[in-house]
Amino acid sequence: PDRAITIAVTGAAGQIAYSLLPLLASGSVFGSRQRVALQLLDLPVTESVLQGVTLELEDGAYPLLELPVKYTSVSEEAFANADIVVLLGSFPRKPGMERKDLLAKNGAIFREQGLVLNRVAKQETRVLVVGNPANTNALTLSQFCTAIPKVNITALARLDHNRLRSLVARRLSCAVSDVHDVAIWGNHSSTQYPDVSFAYTSGVPVGKMRAALGGESQLQSEIIPTIQKRGAEVLALRKLSSAMSAARAIGDHLRDWMLGTASENELVSMVVASDGSYGIEKGLMFSFPVHCYRGGRYKIESSLSIDSFSRKYLEITQNELISERDEAMRVVSKMC
Ligand code: NAI
């Protein structure tokens, strides 16, 4: 392709960005022929860090990277003409902080960024929200950014999806590439439902995966909680949240969304606006198994049959998302 793809990244002086930017610049996300222009945004207090990251990107001498790399603390400049916007920047949860305060802080950020995108983005711009609480931040943004169709606004569930895929491979002693169609449902939080009901490998056919992993009690007591708490486990060990794996997941999400999955039938998990499938409230930003097609298109897989074991988990995560949404909408509606 002749034209460079323009990618805006917020929170670009942070941890995830430090792993993500080299993936984008090197061609490992969009391929070895696609030129990439980066527009980096972070808060004014991090200006020198952001400048340092920019110098390092220049020093990487990436053949596909447009120079100079743009960096700024003005969101209009970062978002202008972007094909893809990756929103890593958000207000982190501080010790003792209540969820409602976290939703209020982030409500303000994502309302503002939605309004800016509304002014400067293109209709075709694709937005990926990563900053937590990711589902609800994406919902807030989409409320204030009517210029971008809701289908073009997504949030990241791919890290949870990859974690589950890898766990299944480890349990079955098979290659990760042999594990297909795991799914993450709901919120990117500890209420998410990591689902193996439709997963298969060359040795385990569809419908037999729960049994192959030890049955429903094993799923309930061990496998599901392991994935739900994996982020907290990494945080406790590293004293920093997942960044390398998050960057990898962002690359996977963007590649599949823009270029389609490697095989046409593969299911991947993305947080998208519900179309009402599976009784999930329409418009709620919910992680679903989706199919991706070249050109930035995807479709929620809506024909899976949900049994009572899964239904219980779907209800829990949907209820959490509804209460997050209600709280976020309550606070942002007061900001004018
Ligand atoms: P970090 O704290 O290292 O970096 C965040 C950066 O965002 C900081 O440089 C900060 O100055 C910047 N920032 C804050 N508010 C901003 C704003 N309004 N505009 C522009 N920049 C802003 O955090 P890290 O580790 O890079 O993680 C980023 C976010 O991603 C966090 O919210 C984290 O919880 C979330 N996360 C989400 C995952 C997912 O699967 N959805 C996985 C891992 C992390």
Image (cartoon, rainbow, N blue to C red):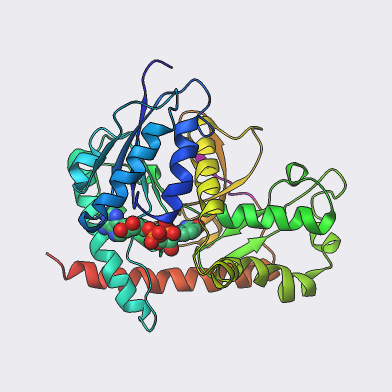
Q: Is residue 298 magenta?
A: yes
Q: Residue at 38%, 72% (x, y): give it.
A: 93
- Splitting the image into 4 quarters, where does residue 306 fall? bottom right
Q: Is residue 190 above or below residue 161?
A: below
In the rendered image, the quadrant that contains the N terminus is top left
Please provide percent x and percent y for residue 187: 50, 64
Q: Foreground: 308 or 319? A: 319
Residue 194 appears in the picture as rendered: yes
What is the residue that sits farthest to the bottom in this orientation? Answer: 96
State the count of labels: 0
- Splitting the image into 4 quarters, where does residue 192 fall? bottom right
Question: Which image quadrant shows ligand 1?
Answer: bottom left
In the rendered image, the quadrant that contains the C terminus is bottom left
Looking at the image, residue 227 sits to the left or right of residue 96; the answer is right
Please provide percent x and percent y for residue 138: 36, 56
Q: Is residue 218 magenta?
A: no
- Splitting the image into 4 quarters, where does residue 37 fall? top left
What is the residue that sits farthest to the left in this orientation? Answer: 336
Q: Which residues are magenta?
A: 297-303
Q: Foreground: 49 or 138? A: 49
Q: Is residue 210 above or below residue 93?
A: above
Q: Residue at 43%, 55% (x, y): give it.
A: 15
Please provide percent x and percent y for residue 111: 24, 58
Residue 131 appears in the picture as rendered: no
Looking at the image, residue 225 sits to the left or right of residue 155; the answer is right
Q: Residue at 84%, 53% (x, y): give it.
A: 173
Q: Is residue 188 above or below residue 191?
A: above
What is the residue that sits farthest to the top in this orientation? Answer: 2
Please provide percent x and percent y for residue 255: 52, 36
Looking at the image, residue 265 sits to the left or right of residue 278; the answer is right
